[in-house]
Amino acid sequence: MTDAAVAVIGMSGRFPGACDLAAFWANLRDGVCSITDFSEKELRDAGVGEEELRDPAYVPSKGYLVGADRFEAELFGFNPAEAVALDPQHRQLLQTAWNALEDAGHDPRRPPRRTGVYVGGGLSEHMIAAHADPGLAARYGAMHLRVLTDREFLAGWISYRLGLDGPSLTVQTACSTSLTAVHLAAQALLLGECDTALAGGVSIDSVRRRGYLYRPGGVFSPDGRCRPFDEKAAGTVPGNGVGLVVLRRLEDAAADGDPIRAVIRGSAITNDGSAKVGFTAPSVDRQAAAIVEAWAAAGLDPAQAHYLETHGTATELGDRIEIAAASTAFAEADHCLIGSVKSNLGHLDTAAGVAGLIKTVLMLENRTLVPSANVTRPHPDLRLQASPFDLVTAASPWTSSRGTRRAGITSVGIGGTNVHVAVEEWAGSRPAIRTHAFSGVSYGAFSLSALASVPVSVPALSNTGHLQDAVIGLLSATLGLTRAEDLDRTYLAAGGDSLTAVFLVGRMRDDFDLDVPVTLFLEKLTLREIAERIVRPEENLLASLLDELED
């Protein structure tokens, strides 16, 4: 069993209505719907226009992530100016990675060697706004701005700031991204490409409060509630969140006494290809194949699952296709309960799959089946009475009369990537582990409705004193310094790095017609001294020569 099994030894996540997994579990257990209904004042304050607010089709609801713009920048080596530009998805993923490693029993400052990172994220308003504003590119430098905002660098920043030297991959399969990341991480562990892996995803499309426009025939719900497989199912609701799991090969985790939470017995990934009615449509056959292949990889039959955490979007086509696919894969099962965390949180897009995995692991740990929020009776068109499936409509003990508790998690992505993961409980005990409670500073986010531009250039200054003030101003603005005493720190101590130094060299040349060697920023000089050398290079050169002669 242990040769092809992977242990979940740590988890962390922030979801609508839950700043940590303890709050998340309490909400799941109590059947809480954490989708927020915004007031008109909240929406106006967030910049939603009157025309949109007055549209009868406007639904003022979302799975809103409170504090998505907050970040403890100094802990991760970012200066304030960089923290402002850093996409909220990067901020939240870094903090979640820190907590996940803590939950796995590791000090994030001394992480295990050969740790891989497999993560993905969604499209964000912050990133789009950053690239739409030429003033921001002028302030930060186009390349620096890109690496701070683009989701392409989500994995790289985690590996860099936490010192993780295993494979580092940013994954992208639309809605199934985060569970695909888990599958890839598990495979990498089994192939020996890494010894520990962080896997999951994030989705923060905007930190602002906002709803959406309902369109008949679309994927969104007309009333701001998601009711998968229910008789009132009418679509999904957008949401934001972040989640990561820490994985190790089970034999290694057990031998080292790791705090195991659950076991991944097998996983599989498929694509629909062209065997469906359209690019965005799901496929019965390939969804079923992912389930069958995952349980085959585990050396088990899908019939041995007691619970299935579905993709469950509550759309007419999606629910029908998913039940048909699951019924095919679970054809030999006598009975299996089903649910979907989207009823509690909304659809978390690229973080949806890992949210379902974390929910399922928590159920296994607590030996409790939790209800799908707002779900009461199955939709008659699904004919669940003719299938092995029943909806979980109330919390209940997860009894072990059928042996080891096992479950499956399915995630489906637009474009056809289907993922299924088979998990089972871990019989051993797990110690209570405390993790750092992040609060941080609100750094906001760039907005398309109010692009935060800065002047592209500074007028030429002839007076040396004024020029030195302007250089100090540029250094302070770039490094996000607000106190006069910060200028008595070295460039590196103030949060500068090599990429920012290259940007500053370019700004000095473009704005002040000054040729500054990039090596100047690496010398053991205070920022005041650097500014003085920049504006008085001849005097400094002469002083250096005199010093050498005296020596």
Image (spheres, rainbow, N blue to C red):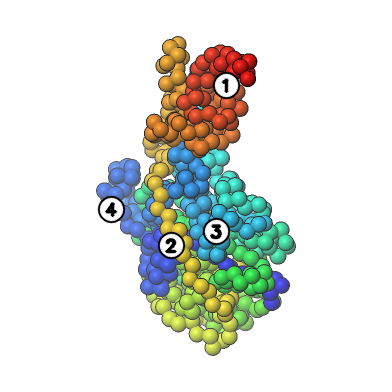
Residue nearest the observer in this picture, 110 or 70: 110
Labelled disc at residue 516 = 1
Labelled disc at residue 304 = none
**Viewer can see residue 239:** no
Q: Nearer the viewer, mark 3 or mark 2?
A: 3
Labelled disc at residue 39 = 4
Give percent across and percent down for residue 56: 31, 51
Question: What amino acid is found at the position of numbered circle 3 in the picture?
Answer: Asp
Considering only order in the chain, which callout, 3 or 4, is on the residue closer to the N terminus?
A: 4
Identify which residue is drawn at 67% across, 56% down: 114
Give percent across and percent down for residue 137: 51, 31
Give percent across and percent down for residue 461: 44, 14
Question: What amino acid is found at the position of numbered circle 2 in the picture?
Answer: Asp
Q: Residues under labels 1 and 4: Cα distance?
A: 53 Å
Circle 4 SS class: loop
Identify which residue is drawn at 44% across, 75% down: 370
Kindly identify which residue carries mark 3: 107
Circle 2 SS class: loop
Residue nearest the observer in this picture, 485 or 356: 485
Instruction: Using residue 155 as the reference point, say whether residue 363 is left or right of it.
Output: left
**Viewer can see residue 81:** yes
Q: Is residue 136 above or below residue 275?
A: above
Q: Residues under labels 1 and 2: Cα distance?
A: 47 Å
Kindly identify which residue carries mark 2: 20
How many numbered marks appear? 4
